[in-house]
Every structure is written in structure tokens, then in C-alpha cells.
Amino acid sequence: MTPSFQQERRLTWHKSSYSHNDGDCVETASTPGAVVAVRDTKALSAGNLAIPNNAWTRLTAALKN
């Protein structure tokens, strides 16, 4: 389930410690419903992706390898 606009505003978004302050960042937030919301800080009005927790875990593990 993709968080609604109102839910999205209440989420606690996190930016990677590897991000710089130049605006080229991806943020994530845990949501009710076992999904991770992912958004582009340059395109906040574009909304976000809702990725199931298990898929997010596999993706981040693969990126670390």
C-alpha cells in the first residue's frame, strides 16, 4: 500500500549519512503496513515508492555486496 499524502507528511524520513547537501538524495521512511517508502528529495511532489520490507532488505543487502 502506498502511503497517502496525509500519511506521507507524518512519516519520519531518513537520509543516508553518505548524502551531501547538494539535493541529490534519496530518503526512506518506515510505514505502517510493512513497507518502506522511498522518495527523491529533488522531486518531492512526485510522491514515493512503496517497497515491501523483505524486498527492501534484499535490495540493500545486494547493494552492499
Image: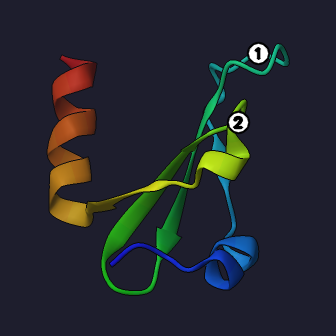
Query: Measuring 28% from the left and 36% from the top, which residue is drawn there?
Result: 60
Relative image position of residue 18 (x, y in whole percent): 62, 19
Farthest front residue in view:
46
Question: Toward the viewer: 34 or 8?
Answer: 8
Please say if 62 is above or below 2: above
Please say if 47 is above or below 7: above
Residue 41 is labelled as: 2
Please say if 22 is above or below 40: above
Query: Measuring 22% from the left and 49% from the top, which residue is drawn there?
Result: 57
The C terminus lies in which quarter of the figure?
top left
Q: Secondary structure at mark 1?
A: loop
Residue 20 is labelled as: 1
Question: Toward the viewer: 53 or 65?
Answer: 53
Q: Amino acid at mark 1?
A: His
Would residue 57 appear left or right of 22 to someone viewing this image?
A: left
The N terminus lies in which quarter of the figure?
bottom left
Would residue 5 appear left or right of 50 to someone viewing this image?
A: right
**Circle 1: is it few (<14), some (14-19), or many (20+) Cα within 10 Å?**
few
Mark 2 or mark 1: which comes first in sequence?
1
Residue 60 is labelled as: none
Would residue 64 appear left or right of 19 to someone viewing this image?
A: left
Query: Measuring 65% from the left and 26% from the top, which residue is drawn there?
Result: 25
Relative image position of residue 41 (x, y in whole percent): 70, 36
Q: Amino acid at mark 2?
A: Thr
Q: How far apart in space, not on screen, are marks 2 and 1 (Cα)?
A: 12 Å
Colouring chosen for the image of the structure: rainbow
Query: Measuring 58% from the left and 55% from the top, which residue is drawn there?
Result: 47
Relative image position of residue 61 (x, y in whole percent): 20, 34
Q: Secondary structure at mark 2?
A: loop
**Circle 2: is it few (<14), some (14-19), or many (20+) Cα within 10 Å?**
some
Callout 2 touching callout 1 (CB < 8 Å): no
